[in-house]
Amino acid sequence: MEFTLLWAALTGVAFAWAGTKLWSERLPDHPTDRIIGAAAAGLAVGRLVAMMTQVINPLLHPLDILLVRGGVHSGAATVGAVVAYLWASKWTIEFLDATAPAALFGLAGWHAGCLWRGACLGTASDLPWARAEPGSLISRHPVELYAAVGLATAAWLVSRMPWRLLTRAGAALGLAGIIRLLTEPLRPSLTGGPVGWYIAAIAVGGLAIWLGPRLASQRITAPT
């Protein structure tokens, strides 16, 4: 079993729990359990999609589903997590806004969990805070810590936003996309990363912010 990955996941859970305590207003019951359940569902969906894109049949290789280090499709995982959360919340959209800061804080914890995995470093850098891998003379950006700080800051910013339908949820999705997009060039990658999905997250987040108040007004004016 990969214990460093487990510790990183538990760090994310701890941050999400802390987020529900810091920003508890309008949260549903058992908020941390709901976040963990949605994250687990999203992880499963993302892993299945990654396997299929790698031409690995999950039915023929079911144990490979557990090999998370083999790859998880981040876009599919996000969609799966949101759908799972809404389903568990009986499609109460308002809970997305209430949970957004804690979810971002949990994601910040997952990135900070790179300290357990020894996977914080990215591309080469001469900045004073850059660090080198053990046995290496090349210092590198602690890119995952950049992402962790950015996501934690985003969680605080979202918590300060007004209570308009999908405003906080849309902002959380958009900010997560922006932070990942900005830090992606600092990650060693042969493909450049799933940049398209980050751009899609920004676009969908902006659309949600625009659409939410209009949906809310339709609810108010709809005949009973």
Image (cartoon, rainbow, N blue to C red):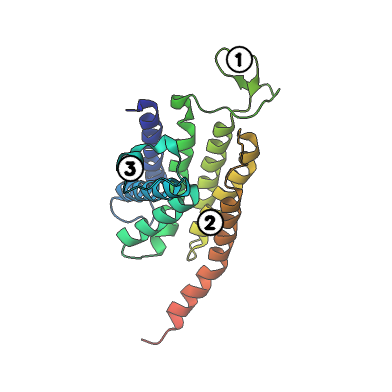
How far separated are the C-alphas under marks 3 and 1? 37 Å
Q: Quadrant of the C terminus?
A: bottom left
How far separated are the C-alphas under marks 2 and 1? 44 Å
Nearer-N-terminus badge (2/1): 1
105 vs 135, nearest the viewer: 135
Q: Nearer the viewer, mark 3 or mark 1?
A: 3
| Label 3 CA crowd tier, 10 Å (few <14, some 14–19, many 20+) | few
- Residue at the spot of label 2: 161
Is residue 98 something that shows in the picture?
Answer: no
- Which percent across, then down, holds residue 2? 36, 28
- In the rendered image of this protein, does residue 3 appear above or below residue 179? above
Q: Amino acid at mark 1?
A: Ser
Q: Nearer the viewer, mark 2 or mark 3?
A: 3
- Which percent across, then down, holds residue 209? 55, 64
Q: Nearer the viewer, mark 2 or mark 1?
A: 1
100 vs 147, nearest the viewer: 147
- Residue at the spot of label 3: 61
